[in-house]
Amino acid sequence: MSDYDDRPNWREIDRKKDKSRHYGRAEEKGQTKHRPDANRWEIGRRKEALDRLFKGEKGTLEHDKLLNKIHKAYGTNSFIASIKAYADKYGVPEDFSTLMLFLDSGDQGYIIMAVDKLREVLDNLSNRQREDVKRKLSIIRMTHKSNDIREKAEEFLEGL
């Protein structure tokens, strides 16, 4: 029975564990047990704010509203007006989806601007996006009323 008497009881084991440097000290110092990047949401918000700051004029909420207005107005009578409002204020958009909408505008000036911008950003596009551009421009090449637009689409497709 003496073997059992020398063995520490559970209370003593817990006390020793509490005194250990490796166990339970983070809460006492005001730290958490989590990794340093535990608050990812806050880090993401900071990164987004910095990205907006470096975008300059295109990082404002007004820019986002005009951009969303183009996407929401697609297929309505106000589509060309929303494209015109955006293009007058910010020029040609840089994102792929809006450039594709510019190609659907039917206005010769906006289509030419969009094709030129697509030529600039072609290297940054994914394979799927490149295929979408090819399809859209081949349709424009076959169906558009303007010879200038058809020629511009033809030149673009030959360059691919």
Image: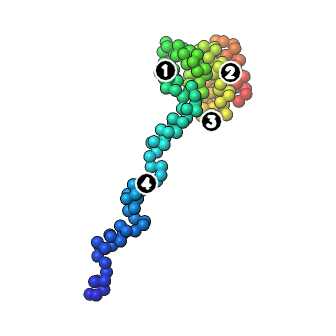
Q: Give the foreground label among 1 and 2.
A: 1
Q: Is residue 127 visible?
A: yes
Assess whether mark 4 and mark 3 are in contact (beta carbons under 8 angstroms).
no
Assess whether mark 1 and mark 3 are in contact (beta carbons under 8 angstroms).
no
* Label 3: element kind: helix
Q: Residues within 10 Å of mark 2 (few under 14, many from 20)?
A: many
Q: Give the foreground label among 1 and 4.
A: 4
Q: State which quadrant residue 28 falls in.
A: bottom left
Counting residues from the start of the chain, the first of labels 1 and 4 encountered is: 4
Counting residues from the start of the chain, the first of labels 1 and 2 encountered is: 1
Circle 3 is placed at which residue position? Answer: 127
Above or below, 31 against 115 in this view is: below
Marks 3 and 1 sit apart, C-alpha to C-alpha, by 27 Å
Counting residues from the start of the chain, the first of labels 3 and 4 encountered is: 4
73 relative position to 120: left or right: left
Q: The residue under label 2 is which amino acid type?
A: Ala
128 relative position to 5: left or right: right
Counting residues from the start of the chain, the first of labels 3 and 1 encountered is: 1
Q: Position of residue 83 (x, y in %)?
A: 55, 17
Q: Residue at x 56, y 15 (%)?
A: 84
Quadrant containing the N terminus is bottom left
12 relative position to 127: left or right: left
Marks 3 and 4 sit apart, C-alpha to C-alpha, by 39 Å
- Residue 69's disc number: 1
Above or below, 60 against 3 in this view is: above
Circle 4 is placed at which residue position? Answer: 34
Assess whether mark 2 and mark 4 are in contact (beta carbons under 8 angstroms).
no
Q: Position of residue 101 (x, y in %)?
A: 56, 22
Q: Residue at x 28, y 87 (%)?
A: 2
